[in-house]
Amino acid sequence: MNDSRLRDLVLVAGHAAFKSNVAGVPADIDSDDAWVLQPFQVGEPPFYVEHIRRGVVLAANNPVALLLFSGGRTRPDSGEWSEAKTYHEIARATEFWIPDKLKTTRDGLAARTDLENFARDSFENVLFGICRFQQLVGSYPRTVTVASWAFKSARFDLHRAAIRFPAYRFRFVGVNDPLDLSDALNGERKALHSFSGDPFGSGADLSGKRLKRNPFDQVHTYRECPGMREFFTFMADPGNSEKPYGAQLPWEDPTG
């Protein structure tokens, strides 16, 4: 892509992917049948589609934004379908919900839409999304807007703070909440507790979950992004979870 006109990142965090035997986007994308779902995700595909649509709207309203769908091949039953590929193909199949009379707008948005295919959790959605922007555009984003479950607002701000992305350049858009919000909030409290003590997810609990969500042993390429090799090495050491990273990160303001 390498489009230097793009300045901002609109990131849609993935939550599930199609089954490996799904050849293309089904006519009924809201049905559970095409998706690999955990028991607590039953009935959620319509909510995921709304996440995709909100990302489309946010990016369509900002002509210098890159729309990025983020999420890896996290389940063995999904085969070649990553979460990002699933979301991206839905956007393409629906023609971004933009009518033919606005074809120029639709084509322009399609040209500035891409995938981040490695993230295994919400922390990686944010960090990998920023790095993927750099790979595609040639610079780091001026602003980051994340679209996801509304109940995850505090978690995404925790991730933003962990990588020291400036708060005034970060926006979280809570699109909706799942059917069983009470159960989701119980799980979220546990996730917040885990990430509060292990902000990079390098400890046994969170890194173990990432291993389980990488059944195809994929290795990301973001260490090669400018200014990132040392930071990835730092984050990989669980002993650094409460230590400040000593160098300036490439998206930080010089004045801090």
Image (cartoon, rainbow, N blue to C red):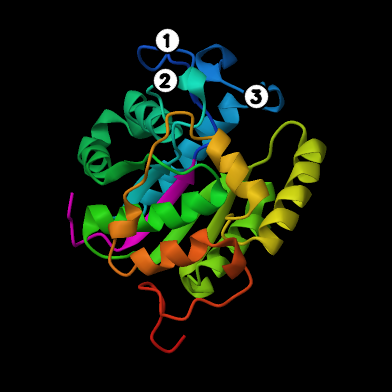
Local crowd size for mark 3, using a 10 Å CA cut-off: few (<14), some (14–19), many (≥20): few
Q: Which residue is mark 1?
A: 21
Q: Secondary structure at mark 1?
A: loop
Rendering coords of residue 128 (x, y %) = 41, 52
Q: Is residue 191 left or right of residue 141?
A: right
Give the labeled residue for mark 3: 38
Q: CA distance from mark 2 to mark 1?
A: 8 Å
List x then y, in percent, for residue 184: 75, 39
Q: Amino acid at mark 2?
A: Gly
Residue beneath label 2, please?
79
Q: Secondary structure at mark 3?
A: loop
Residue drawn at 54 percent across, 39 percent down:
211
| Left-right relation of 161 to 89 | right
Foreground: disc 3 or disc 2? 2
Is 182 left, or right, of 27 in this rendering?
right
Stretch in magenta:
1-13
Q: Position of residue 195 (x, y in %)?
A: 66, 57
The answer to the question of whether label 2 and label 1 lie on touching residues, with beta carbons closer than 8 A, is yes
Q: Residue at x 63, y 27 (%)?
A: 44
Helix, strand or loop at label 2? It is loop
Classify 188 as above or below 93. Answer: below
Three-letter residue code for mark 1? Asn
Left or right of 175: which side holds 54?
A: left
Q: What amino acid is at disc 3?
A: Gln
Looking at the image, tell me whether mark 3 or mark 2 is earlier in sequence order.
Answer: 3
